[in-house]
């Protein structure tokens, strides 16, 4: 599924892929209810759990609800990962 | 000790011989991130096997504007893009090793040659009419 997703992202300028190692990011596993792998999440809403043909995945991506502007405002960074705010005085 | 043993190194070099156009690997790290070192090391070992691969390591905090532009909120992140293009279609979070290493190498070839999985071409993805973000959860090791 990774290669299929990456192939779609390479072919379509509208698609980006985040390949996430579940072992390294347990908080994301919890947040996105990952019970089995591979698991594909489209716009953080539509789940694809099985290995599916390319045409099926493309259809699901095309039909998925648009990315939520609310989700966009809540990045999946942990607070500890976020770049520190610049000191307004020191720059 | 290198992460790739001699046998895997030789096989990887052979696989990467398919690369044609340059591919950039940008690794975002952060102080105190132990796994970041492994990702930089692995990417470095892979980059050393082909003249078509470029590797840059950047600190997430000091390169915050670029990280934001590329949509990178976490570390370790390895961003793959065609050299000279602003867009980064694929981002790896964590070490693309073990069972994911093969797909990682094939993705480098895909970005370099433009040849991906059969059935996935510009015409077939034209049905996708608005931006979409895919998260693919895997178990790398």
Image (cartoon, coloured by chain):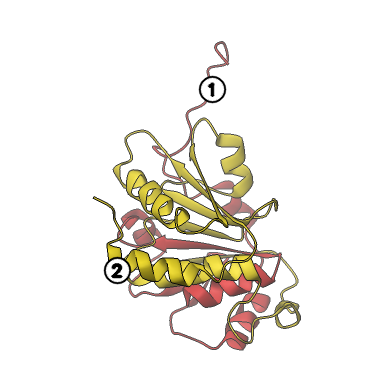
Chain colours: A red, B yellow
- Image position of A81 with respect to B119: above or below: above
Residue holding disc 2 = B7
Q: Nearer the viewer, residue B22 or B57?
A: B22
Q: Tell me the subunit letter for badge 2.
A: B
In this picture, is A86 found above or below A45?
Answer: above
Residue B24 position within the rendered picture, expressed as x and y whole percent measured from the top left = 58, 53
Q: Position of residue A29 (x, y in %)?
A: 36, 62
Disc 2 crowd, CA 10 A, few/some/many (<14, 14-19, 20+): few
- Please tell me which residue is depicted at 46% across the width and 63% down the height of the picture: A19
- State whether residue B37 appears in this view: yes
Q: Nearer the viewer, residue B122 or B50?
A: B50
**In terms of depth relative to the viewer, which is nearer, B95 or B41?**
B41
Q: Quadrant of the C terminus of chain B?
A: bottom left
| Chain containing the residue with disc 1 | A
Mark 2 or mark 1, whichever is nearer to me = 2
C-alpha span from label 2 to label 1? 46 Å
* Residue drawn at 66 percent across, 66 percent down: A66
């Amino acid at each position: 599924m990774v290669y299929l997703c990456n192939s779609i992202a390479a072919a379509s300028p509208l698609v980006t892929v985040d390949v996430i190692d579940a072992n390294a990011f347990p908080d994301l596993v919890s947040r996105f209810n990952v019970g089995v792998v591979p698991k594909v999440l489209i716009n953080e809403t539509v789940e694809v759990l099985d290995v599916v043909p390319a045409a099926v995945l493309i259809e699901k991506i095309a039909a998925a609800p648009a990315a939520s502007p609310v989700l966009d405002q809540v990045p999946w960074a942990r607070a500890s990962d976020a770049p520190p705010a610049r000191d307004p005085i020191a720059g | 000790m290198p992460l790739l043993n001699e046998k895997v190194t030789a096989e990887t070099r052979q696989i990467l011989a398919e690369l044609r156009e340059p591919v950039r690997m940008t690794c975002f790290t952060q102080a105190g991130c132990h796994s970041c070192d492994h990702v930089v090391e692995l990417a470095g070992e892979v980059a050393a096997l082909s003249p078509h691969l470029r590797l840059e390591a950047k600190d997430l905090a000091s390169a915050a504007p670029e990280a934001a532009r590329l949509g990178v909120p976490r570390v370790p992140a390895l961003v793959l893009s065609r050299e000279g293009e602003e867009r980064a279609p694929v981002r790896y979070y964590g070490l693309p090793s073990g069972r994911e290493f093969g797909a990682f190498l094939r993705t480098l070839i895909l970005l370099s040659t433009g040849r991906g999985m059969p059935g996935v071409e510009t015409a077939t993805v034209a049905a996708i009419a608005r931006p979409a973000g895919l998260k693919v959860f895997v178990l790398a090791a």
